[in-house]
Amino acid sequence: MSHPFSNINKNFGFGVMRLPLDENNKVDLTKFQEMVDYFIANGFNYFDTAHVYLHGESEKALKECLVKKYKREDFVLTNKLSSSCFKNEEDILPFFNLQLECCGVEYFDFYLMHAQSSNNYEQYQKAHAYEVAKKLKEEGKIKHLGISFHDSAEFLEKILIDHPEVEVVQLQFNYLDYDSEDVQSRKCYEVCLKYNKPIIVMEPVKGGRLVNLPSKADKLLKDLKNGSNASYAIRFAASFENVFMVLSGMSYMDQVIDNVSFMKNFIPLNEIEKDTLNKVVSIFNEIPTIACTSCKYCLDGCPKHIKIPSLFTCYNNYQLFKEDNAFDSYKYHTSENGKASDCIKCGKCEKICPQHLKIRDLLKDVAKTFE
């Protein structure tokens, strides 16, 4: 679709959140450089980051592999104001300047109030975060102001009424969450249409869950012979009116190559593909899995150092595929970190979870399965 924003080449962007890591758990800059170069060489130029991604290493990797190599006008860069990075209004400007420095740029094309929900919105209001960002836009340090959002459609409407200056909304949007009452993808999408807010899609493959499918669902997509599992998920999101950008948090070169192959000359889903995805959703709904996207926001605050996303992946793999090696994986992830049963129910993880998962209860299910 057409959109009011200049300098965006195509409707597919690079989410710089799940990058390849080396043996020291640092971003592998050699591999990331190859990914960036291939992405840009194929006509794409939109990159999305946040200071909290990879503990600040995402921004630095972009500075090294994107900003230092390419002209500023040749790429589009989005950054975010995360709730963990400020306490009051006085903190915001120094933090913003730190982000500019870490990225090596003088402005951000898009700047988003990060992961807005009823859990953190009041913090942004008290600190006048939207007003500070609006002033930064007037100064030319932000080109477009927006939000990323994880809550109900009703709460999204409240924010858009409170802040009509919001130009874009970044939503979790995929075919599995489309009619979910927890995520409310469709309802939030409809609110954006009502207020004429262009949409950026995040989590189109739901943290990889729509790539590694149950065998029955996997066969349905393979029989279509029209592309990879990821291709159907990303094309689903990109097929909607008012969606001008779909992000993928790519970790490996193979993912970049695959995604570029079908988004370079984007074709919306046909009716047969749509019907098949509905069948895939039905299969998913029959299996009790945990809707974790492995964003890892929950890790920093856990006093027992439980690798929550990894343990949830073990649980899902066992539920979906009945893999015996899920038990070995569970032992590996708990050998030097907390077990699911070590949870002291402090609730810090639930306050920050974008999926609003009842993590404390879910860890009981994980412990029951593996311990």
Image: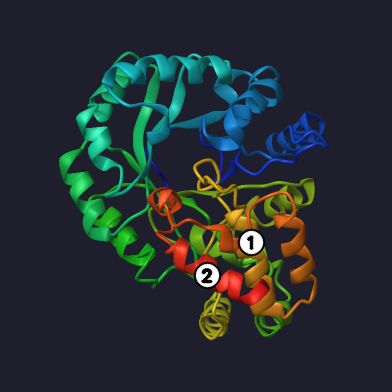
Query: Image quadrant for the C terminus?
Result: bottom right
Position of 346 relative to 127 (above/below): below
Can I make out residue 205 in this image?
Answer: no
Position of 260 relative to 85 (above/below): below
Closer mark to the observer between disc 2 and disc 1: 2
Viewer-proximal residue among 46 and 185 = 185
**Residue 278 image position (x, y, % from top left):** 51, 81
Can I make out residue 330 in this image?
Answer: yes
Position of 129 relative to 138 (above/below): below
What type is the residue that disc 2 sits on?
A: Lys
**Residue 192 image position (x, y, % from top left):** 29, 53
Q: Check disc 2 and report the residue beneath it.
A: 364
Q: Check disc 1 and report the residue beneath it.
A: 311
- The colour mode here is rainbow
Q: Residue at x 62, y 18 (%)?
A: 71
Position of 105 relative to 125 (above/below): above
Viewer-proximal residue among 262 and 234 = 234
Tag 2: Cα neighbours inside 10 Å, few (<14), some, or many (≥20)? Answer: some
Q: CA distance from mark 2 to mark 1?
A: 11 Å
Secondary structure, mark 1, is helix
Viewer-proximal residue among 120 and 273 = 120
